[in-house]
Amino acid sequence: MSIAILGGLDRLKNYYEQKGKDLGYSVKVFSQRVPNLAQRLSSVNGIVIFTGTIAHHMVADANRVAKKHKIPIGRSQSSSVSAFKKCLSSISVRS
């Protein structure tokens, strides 16, 4: 199962990836705006959005893709690793 993380702190990128790997997920982190974000998100099984550290247009793109492809979204104001784990558990329950 692959998860995309939108937002978050750059210094925690390795922790997000490692914690996701430990829990059996393949993790892609998008902490900055990237070209073709909607196309990249359409191939994931879940999206985690850290709302405190992300631009509004990235959230809009993620919401549009998630609705179109029925991808579950987990949201957190905090960008901590424990908040990431909570979002993963909420996504896996909905899947």
Image: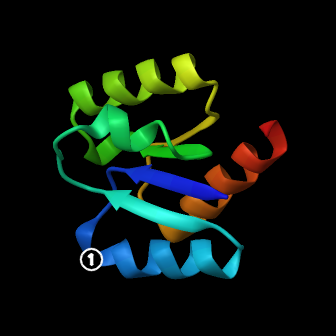
**Image point (41%, 58%), residue name:** 79
At x 23%, y 37%, the residue is 36
Give the camera-side residue of 21 and 69: 69
Which quarter of the picture shows residue 86? bottom right
Residue at disc 1, secondary structure:
helix
Question: Does residue 48 sit above or below 73 in this rendering?
Answer: below
Q: Is residue 41 above or below residue 8?
A: above
From the image, tell me which residue sits under label 1. 11
- Residue 5 point in image, percent of width and height: 43, 53
Question: Which residue lies at the image location 27% right of the left edge and 47% below the top edge?
Answer: 53
Rendered location of residue 90, percent (x, y): 73, 45
Q: Residue furthest right?
A: 93
**Vertical arrangement, residue 70 with respect to residue 34, above or below:** above
Q: Position of residue 91 (x, y in %)?
A: 70, 44
**Is 40 situated left or right of 2 in this image?**
left
The way the protein has been coloured in the rendering is: rainbow
Task: Name the quarter where the C terminus is drawn.
Answer: top right
- 91 on left or right of 95: left
Work out which quarter of the rendered image holds the N terminus and state it: bottom right
10 Å crowding of disc 1: few (<14), some (14-19), many (20+): few
Is 27 left, or right, of 14 in this rendering?
right
Q: Position of residue 11 (x, y in %)?
A: 27, 77
* Residue 67 against residue 8 in the figure, above or below: above
Residue drawn at x 28%, y 39% as measured from the top left: 37
Q: Amino acid at mark 1?
A: Arg
Horizontal side of 74 relative to 5 (left or right) equals right
